[in-house]
Image (cartoon, rainbow, N blue to C red):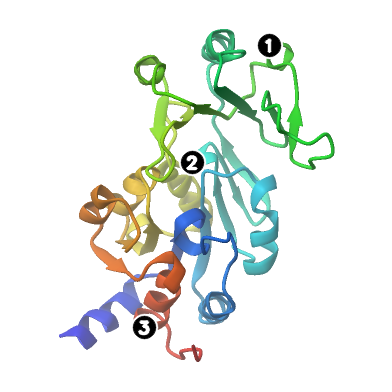
Amino acid sequence: MKAQIEKETKVMIKGIVMDLDQTLLHNDKQISRYTLQVLEQAKRQGLTLFFATGRSVMRIENYRRQVHPEGLICLNGGLNLWQGQRVSQYPLNPSLVKSVVERLNGLSGCRLTLTYADTIFTNDPQTRHDDPIYHRADLPGCPMDSVLKISINLDSDQEAAWLNSLDCTCLANAHEPGYYVLVSSVVSKLTGARDLCRRCGLDLSELAVFGDDFNDLPLLQNCGIGIAVMNAHPEVKAAASQTCFSNEQDGPAHWIAEVLLKEKPEF
């Protein structure tokens, strides 16, 4: 029976969608040599690779150079690229951005970050002046009409109810209490996957998806196979159709090698 399931899965799955933090990456934020070997073999076999992350394009450049995925779902679906070309982006309502900045900028214990397609501005006082990605800025003076993601770090949950009342999607983080992300109400990683599938000719049913956090739920529940790593939040594991080893144990790579690959790299 297991062999039959694996055979049917090999035929059905044509693309692999991978979350990065706490899923593909080890806790030290590196991709293991074994995982890189498996993903290279998957590409040689004709499988299409996608990253699906809350990170900006600038913050995944090193991983992109290592793996060379054709599809990038960034900012939780707020910015999506196919073979390096922008396919779609979904900015937040400028009036909402303005209200968030006015309310939270300068609030004690709050770090606020505005992410655009090609730059990131933050009020975090610990940001280095020579940081190549994050730029310390006076946020009220930043453009409000092209923000794709707002990241908020709070020392307490005193503003959580207000954030969840806003007319946008508010995402909490299962591994980092007090960290919230705001994106457009039409955005999720599933949005990005749909946009890229339309571009490349795949169907959502042909995707195997790996994830660990709440922002992975729409993908895990609406694609061909949703696989949660063992270190995923319990709610995420319950929603997935399958589980694999943890990120520290190269769970996604082992699942891919066992289920999808015709020739398996040595571990």
Q: Quadrant of the N terminus?
A: bottom left
Q: State the image coordinates of residue 26 (x, y, percent, origin top left).
A: 52, 64
Residue most extreme to the right: 130
Q: Amino acid at mark 2?
A: Asn
Q: State the image coordinates of residue 266 (x, y, percent, origin top left).
A: 50, 91
What residue is shown with label 1? Answer: 140
- Residue nearest the viewer, comparing 120 with 206: 120
- At 68% from the left and 23% from the top, the residue drawn is 123
Residue 170's quadrant in the figure?
top left
In the image: residue 105, left or right of residue 239:
right
Residue 28's quadrant in the figure?
bottom right
> Disc number at residue 266?
none
Choose the circle earlier in sequence order: 3 or 2. 2
Tag 2: Cα neighbours inside 10 Å, few (<14), some, or many (≥20)? many
Q: State the image coordinates of residue 61 (x, y, percent, origin top left).
A: 69, 55
Choose the circle earlier in sequence order: 1 or 3. 1
- SS at badge 3: helix
What residue is shown with label 2? Answer: 76
- At 51% from the left and 56% from the top, the residue drawn is 20
What residue is shown with label 3? Answer: 258
Q: Amino acid at mark 3?
A: Glu
Tag 1: Cα neighbours inside 10 Å, few (<14), some, or many (≥20)? few
Q: Is residue 142 above or below residue 184?
A: above
- SS at badge 1: helix
